[in-house]
Image (spheres, rainbow, N blue to C red):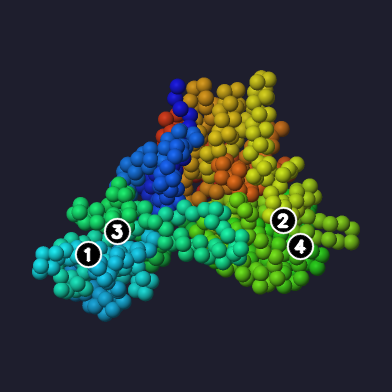
Amino acid sequence: MKKMFMNRELSWLKFNERVLEEAETLSNPLFERLSFVSIYQSNLDEFFMVRVGSLIDQMLLGGDIRDNKTKMTPEEQLNAILPEVEKLNKRKDVIYKQIMKELEGYGIKIVDFHHISKEESEYLERYFDEEIAPLISPTIVGKRQPFPFLKNKDIYAAVVLGTKSGKEKLGIIPCTNGVFPRLIALPSTGAFILSEDIILHFLPKVFQKYYVKSKSLMRVTRNADIDADALYDEDLDYRDFMQELIKKRKKLAPLRLELSREMDGEIVDMLCDFLDVDSKLVFRNRGPMDLSFVFQLQDSFRKIPELFYEKRTPQKSPQFVSGRSILEQIREKDKLLSYPFESMRPFLTMLREAANDDDVVSIKMTLYRVAKHSKIVEALIEAAENGKEVLVLVELKARFDEENNIEWSRRLEDAGCRVIYGLDGYKVHSKLCLITKKTEEKVEYYTQVGTGNYNEKTARLYTDLSLMTAKVEIGLEAAKVFQALAMGETVDSAEYLLVAPKCLQNKVIAMIEEEISRAKAGEPAYIGLKMNSLTDKKIMEKLSEASCAGVKIDMIIRGINCLIPGIEGKTENITVRSIVGRFLEHSRIYIFGTEGREKVYIASADFMSRNTLRRVEVAAPVYDEDIKMRLKEMFAIMLKDNQKARTENRRGEYFLVQETEKAPLNAQEFFYAQAYAGVEQA
């Protein structure tokens, strides 16, 4: 019988392949296609730093550590991953070349020394001599010059140098120093060259006492899989400890080596020895090793509109009336904001209003990732300075955002906020805000629960949901969550909210069991789930049981999905779709039950064991019938997407939804059209 589980890492690679497919999609504007190539590459960098790093750590630990779904060992997983990466990277290089060829029609070129004029070559030599050569720091590896430390993801030029005596030496030059620009414009309009290509070309001018035998650009990816909780010393200040941890992560062992050119096998082996990298983790890149320059290039050509998506701006939500108190409007009726289609402004206004309301006694909030220049944090600081009690949990273990969070935590503390830094053994990933207002008559609670971070930048790029309610029962349970966090604990029970790690997974399973019971009794039964990833084995087994009982299950899962749909006797009543489009799908919606009795939630949690068992997450029930209807309609529209949706078959393969007989429907564009229409009607 066919297995119903897919390995997590292989499923992730299938997601990144879907990102790459968007770069291949001819209906996407050229610069947007180029962005998808860059996103594919940065996704893959993080995959190696975290997931491959974890597998290598497990291999070093030895023992019989196996994936609990497929029973694959770490080595088996690595051996399955690498050929897929090799195949996808070759595809990425071809796509990049095709896109750049098409951009030439607009006078936009990234050139090399094989495709420039003599005058341009002379210009670049002068540029190298005057602007680059004085700023580089070459090294020749030898007894007195040990192999240098290579920074994570920085680009270096490696050169094999010949001597008159016949000996070979290895030279290395850092190409990433932040002093000279990466993208260098040639005198001819629209043509650019990358600084690392200039350095590589003019290596003979640097090593004049030698002759160049072979050369290549190279880039190292270092392991970032580091367990903060396992290393924490209670005698240390936690913020100082996290700063030291960030420094340590930057120096962790290399695990991948990328080269831009073929080099002699002995040289590659020598580099692997110096870096202690397994030779099977050496990759050849035929395009640029770092595509972050794409966004700088785009900024230079915004004046050509057909190269970009049509401009979209988050719209004013018709639920809110200008000039009236936001808190008052929430007290009258629950509100839902849908990003990026609707503006985040009402939430920001609510925080500022609370900061200056004499009756507001406290604001409590969890912060996981925030913008570099955060208006949200500024509002919290203003509230503290106005004498409010402000409690903020800043999660310092938000991977790759630790430094930003450390800086904000200092500013919050300086303003008089009470700042706590997460819990031992758990990340706090919930998106929860509680405003408490005390009047002469009563205490009022205003609770906001979101699916995404309190980040003004990502609110324009990610699809997320933000529920705001004045329901007392929700406010009291939110207060219970914050009380537990303040004491370094987790909530043991909750009646209304679903709160991981102790009362989310079990409640989800109970709701699945309710649908199983309905189906077995011959009644209609339904489950609809939208999230980023599904890996929790306990939940997946229960979903399979529900499918076997006859429960219809629709899942919209952008990224990793370890439960293969459509397998007879196991998952035949489950459908899986993935939407990869202009905006990153990030909202989480849970629907349990058929019309008239359905329970609808929005949540910060994916169904991954890390979310359900090792993080503090919050899912909020939707009681307002209008909002409930809106969420169900949104879910239905996403199920009908036939432009950016891909469906997964019983072999675990994804295919674009082919419904040529139906009118084209891009869910994200549909929601933006709705948002614009809502403003026009208001």
Distance between mark 3 and mark 4 Cα atoms: 56 Å
**Neighbours of disc 2 within 10 Å: few (<14), some (14-19), many (20+):** few
Compare residues 55 and 120 and report the one nearer the observer. 55
Pointer 2: what residue?
487
Question: Residue 635 in the image: x percent, y percent?
Answer: 59, 40
Distance between mark 1 and mark 2 Cα atoms: 56 Å
| Residue at left offset 54%, top offset 56% | 231
Pointer 4: what residue?
362
Looking at the image, can residue 468 be seen?
A: no
Compare residues 46 and 464 and report the one nearer the observer. 46
In contact (CB < 8 Å): disc 1 and disc 2? no
In contact (CB < 8 Å): disc 3 and disc 4? no
**Neighbours of disc 3 within 10 Å: few (<14), some (14-19), many (20+):** few
**Among the 4 quarters of the image, the one containing residue 162:** bottom left
| Residue at left offset 72%, top offset 56% | 487
Compare residues 495 and 298 and report the one nearer the observer. 495
Name the N-terminal-most of marks 3 and 4: 3
| Residue at left offset 16%, top offset 63% | 168
In contact (CB < 8 Å): disc 4 and disc 1? no
Q: What residue type is labelled 3?
A: Phe
Pointer 3: what residue?
274
Q: Which mark is residue 488?
A: none
Question: Residue 167 in the image: x percent, y percent?
Answer: 14, 64
Distance between mark 1 and mark 3 Cα atoms: 11 Å
Pointer 1: what residue?
170
Question: Residue 529 in the image: x percent, y percent?
Answer: 59, 38
User: Depth-wise, is mark 1 or mark 3 nearer the camera?
Assistant: 3
* Residue furthest right in the image: 441
Distance between mark 4 and mark 2 Cα atoms: 17 Å
